[in-house]
Image (cartoon, helix red, strand yellow):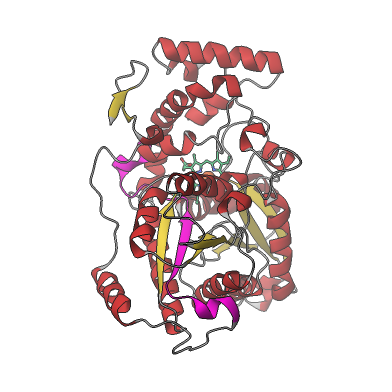
Amino acid sequence: MIGFVGGLGVAVPTGTASRQDGALRVRQRCVPLARQTRRAAVRMTAVAPSQTPATAEPGRSAGVKKLGVLLLNLGGPERPEDVQGFLYNLFSDPDIIRLPRLLSPLQSFLANEIARSRAPKSRAAYESIGGGSPIVRITNQQASALEDELLARGYSAKVFVGMRYWHPFTEEAVEEIKAYGPDRLVILPLYPQYSISTSGSSLRVLDRLFKKEKEAFSPLKIDHTVVPEWYQRPGYVHAQAKLIKEQLATLTDEEKKSTKVMFSAHGVPESYIEAGDPYQQQIEECCKLIMQEVEDTDWTLSYQSRVGPVQWLQPYTDVVLEELGKEGLQNLVVVPISFVSEHIETLEEIDIEYRELAHESGIKKFLRVPALDCNPDFVKDLADMSLEALEKPSLRVGEAMNLSIKGDAQDPADMPDVDIAFGFNNSAETLNGRLAMLALAALTSANFVSGQGMNMFSNLLH
Ligand SMILES: C=CC1=C(C)c2cc3[nH]c(cc4nc(cc5[nH]c(cc1n2)c(C)c5CCC(=O)O)C(CCC(=O)O)=C4C)c(C)c3C=C
Ligand SMILES: [Fe+2]
């Protein structure tokens, strides 16, 4: 259903949780024909591993009749006209922007305003990489490669993709899983390190959907288990280390004397870490494990893609780049670490913005380690972790989504609010309608009361 919010004249779907889905387009999941054909063939010919195991393991996984694997990911706009809807969905997520509880009814309205104001800048960034995000295409390819690997190991398996903020939404994947009817389902967020804002958010959506479809997803029918984090897996660590070594091998011995590896992780606000998000600790441990394999190269870790002026995890990648340039560093190998496919923040932020900044700062060679995408070692490890998960006691979605949250705050609603502050300035003037002013007044006074900063919202806007 499409409704109008706050007299803004902006069409916003007001159906399921007011999520935007691309202006009522009926979209098919983009699956290459060859893959569809292959999948159909697989359904007819695949046999249970107990009949013809290739590298099938003993134990519970051997008894699986029909295996489902659900890959959870963020999603991204595929076309310029998708950008605003995608941003709306992202900013509507209370795991991304948590308003004080009293103001939470305004979330949808504010998300709409932020999305509308930010869309031109984001659209330009997506246009510089071809008009849209490659995430859906690459995640589908990863799903296909993983499915092939599982089939090659003798499992009758199907891999599904559920995105958090754009098509194919998790709801679509849940429908597909229901139709397939696996007896075991492995849920695999495609984020190596767990964050409340990524895996946590996706799992919360899935938990709601499973509760809605209680009968179909009863553990007696579909016995599901979650792999909540996998940053420390030797297979993944090895695949990352190998890619770094390949970049280092392109440098001469002379160049290697002034070379650093720089891991650049997507940031989160510091308040998340204070709320118990294990993300920073897992990122740090992950980098250490990778560098134990790479050896003999200096390395550093920084955080990119901050939004707004609240404190995000530091040091910031742009600041570190300038410092390294000042110190006279000649060569840099940049490693995107928190995401396993190419996306706007590797292709635009690192490859274009940071490259330019590095050169301006005096760094001569700027190499970038490619994202894992369909790297064969990585795909094998995805298969290994799916099958190993079947051997362990099941970890249910409801448990996995709260794993990270400290102390008694098992309900995310009990977590501290993410600081949002407002300012009456040029950006504030872009808000329109009486509801906007109401929201603004409410939030401004809320932040005056709490003594927090003034500018986050205006910076989210631009
Ligand atoms: C592990 C990875 C990620 C974390 C943690 C994360 C947290 C986080 N992100 C935002 C705001 C935005 N993220 C955007 C895009 C985006 N984010 C991630 C990953 C993580 N986000 C990816 C892979 C992408 C790219 C998707 C693509 O289309 O390629 C965007 C939109 C782009 C833009 O306008 O800059 C925003 C906004 C917050 C606020 C946050 C933690 C609270
Ligand atoms: Fe993000």
Q: Is residue 73 visible?
A: yes
Closer to the camera, 322 or 400? 400
- At x 55%, y 33%, the residue is 97
Picture coordinates of residue 460, whole percent (x, y): 52, 30
- Range drawn in magenta: 59-84
Picture coordinates of residue 429, whole percent (x, y): 45, 15
Identify whether 330 is placed above or below 453.
below
Q: Is residue 297 visible?
A: no
Picture coordinates of residue 453, whole percent (x, y): 66, 22
Closer to the camera, 181 or 408? 181
Picture coordinates of residue 274, whole percent (x, y): 74, 39
Residue 82 within the magenta-colored segment of the rendering:
yes
The quarter of the displayed image where residue 413 is located = top right
The quarter of the displayed image where residue 269 is located = top right
Query: In the picture provided, is 355 more to the left or to the right than 123?
Result: right
Q: Give the total number of marks visible in the rendering.
A: 0
Identify whether 12 is placed above or below 322.
above
Identify whether 98 is placed above or below 303.
above
On the rendered image, what quadrant is the N terminus found in? Answer: top left
Residue 83 within the magenta-colored segment of the rendering:
yes
